[in-house]
Image (tube, rainbow, N blue to C red):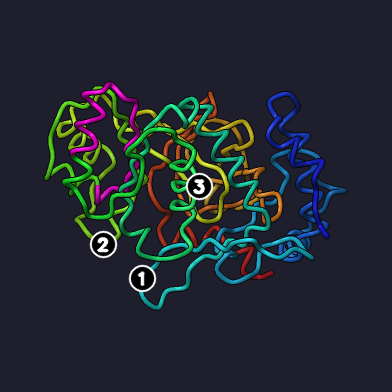
């Protein structure tokens, strides 16, 4: 069985070690045990012998999760997370060998940025995700809700009246509350309910899902802040292909846990990767993806800051995605 138990401990204690050193160990493991990644690395003439630095590690285009099984040889998935998509579209499939790694990752990550989840009442407004199977976001929300000790934690599909009353009760009791919602559902709820919420964090997960006219993040946040009387709207940055998340406490600037790192690539030179501040296409190192792939080239454009925080500027357009993948298409 292609397990790497010694690396599992290193991943979540990476702050006590060199990130680069652990990442290179994970790269070697995945090169040796992940067939699709091994094939990809050989195609661009990269291997553990000529990969000595973080910037030299190959980043697998995220679209491989739509066409290949991205899982270590000899392992069977405990669960499979799937992305949402329009009818007839090809969706990503993340075969997760050990759900315990995901649970460790999102629990530790939440705790790092917000403190113990047990201290919160967690309210989830995720209708489009609940109405399909295989959502990693729903899996995370279910587990966070289960860890809370507060009465009232749970999912609110379309029951805005119950959600409103729960928020009002929590505010009166001074109870720390997290309202986690897909963007369009939070906007719908904001039209139904306005109040000054002093003890509630509003966190959007992105996504209009074709339900509302597209808006910029700034427009969304201003509308939500006005409706809920909060100083900032928090955000979660995650995706089907990852087992870790970035969090923003306002202004759309995301921070990552110690085992996750953002790098940038030139959209027309996919092997040109840097951890320097600037703008470009987003590459992600997620060490929690130990048994799938920790090194992913996304289709997001972003801006990286000197402290390692980042901003998502939008999706790459078709020409940019094609430009990034010209070399990969030949493999």
Q: Is residue 217 magenta?
A: no
**Disc 3, SS:** strand
Answer yes or no: do the residues labelled 3 and 2 have beta carbons within 8 Å? no
User: 270 or 220: which is nearer to us?
Assistant: 220
- Residue, disc 2: 210
Question: Which numbered disc flags the more N-terminal residue, 1 or 2?
Answer: 1
Q: Is residue 261 above or below residue 3?
A: above
Q: Measure how far apart labels 3 and 2 are at the Cα level.
A: 25 Å
Q: Nearer the viewer, mark 1 or mark 3?
A: 1
Image position, residue 64 (x, y; %)? 60, 65
Q: Is residue 173 left or right of residue 111?
A: left
Q: Is residue 167 magenta?
A: yes
- The magenta-colored residue range is 165-185
Answer yes or no: do the residues labelled 1 and 2 have beta carbons within 8 Å? yes
Residue 281 has which mark?
3
User: 145 or 238: which is nearer to us?
Assistant: 145
Q: Quadrant of the N terminus?
A: bottom right
Q: Quadrant of the C terminus?
A: bottom right
- Residue at 13 percent across and 40 percent down: it is 193
Q: Is residue 43 left or right of residue 187?
A: right
Quarter of image, res 288:
top right
- Residue at 41 percent across and 42 percent down: it is 312
User: 179 or 25: which is nearer to us?
Assistant: 179
Q: Nearer the viewer, mark 3 or mark 2?
A: 2
- Residue, disc 1: 86
**Disc 2, SS:** loop
- Residue at 82 percent across and 41 percent down: it is 6
Q: Measure how far apart labels 1 and 2 are at the Cα level.
A: 10 Å
**Disc 1, SS:** loop
Question: Which numbered disc flags the more N-terminal residue, 1 or 3?
Answer: 1
Q: Is residue 282 above or below residue 233?
A: below
Quarter of image, res 149:
top left
């Amino acid at each position: 069985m292609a397990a790497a138990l010694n690396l599992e401990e290193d991943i979540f204690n990476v702050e006590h070690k060199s990130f680069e050193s652990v990442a290179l160990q994970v790269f070697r493991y995945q090169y040796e045990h992940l067939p699709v990644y091994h094939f990809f690395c050989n195609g661009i003439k990269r291997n553990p012998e000529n990969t000595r630095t973080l910037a030299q590690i190959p980043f697998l285009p995220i679209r491989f999760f739509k066409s290949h099984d991205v899982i270590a040889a000899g392992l069977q998935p405990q669960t499979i997370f799937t992305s949402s998509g329009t009818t007839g579209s090809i969706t990503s499939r993340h075969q997760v060998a050990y759900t315990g790694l995901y649970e460790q990752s999102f629990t530790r990550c939440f705790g790092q940025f917000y403190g113990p989840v047990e201290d919160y009442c967690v309210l989830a407004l995720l209708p489009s995700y609940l109405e399909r199977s295989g959502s990693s976001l729903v899996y995370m929300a279910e587990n966070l809700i289960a860890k809370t000790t507060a009465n009232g934690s749970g999912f609110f599909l379309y029951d805005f009246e119950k959600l409103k009353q729960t928020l009002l009760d929590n505010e009166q009791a001074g109870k720390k509350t997290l309202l986690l919602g897909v963007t369009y559902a939070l906007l719908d709820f904001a039209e139904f309910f306005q109040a000054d919420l002093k003890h509630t964090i509003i966190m959007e997960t992105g996504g209009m899902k074709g339900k509302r006219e597209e808006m910029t993040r700034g427009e969304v946040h201003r509308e939500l802040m006005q409706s809920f009387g909060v100083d900032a709207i928090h955000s979660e940055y995650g995706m089907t292909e990852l087992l870790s998340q970035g969090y923003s406490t306002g202004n759309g600037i995301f921070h990552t846990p110690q085992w996750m790192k953002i790098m940038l690539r030139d959209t027309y030179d996919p092997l040109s990767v840097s951890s320097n501040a600037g703008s470009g296409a987003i590459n992600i190192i997620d060490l929690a993806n130990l048994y799938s792939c920790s090194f992913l080239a996304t289709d997001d454009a972003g801006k990286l800051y000197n402290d390692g925080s980042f901003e998502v500027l939008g999706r790459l357009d078709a020409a940019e995605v094609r430009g990034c993948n010209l070399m990969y298409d030949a493999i």
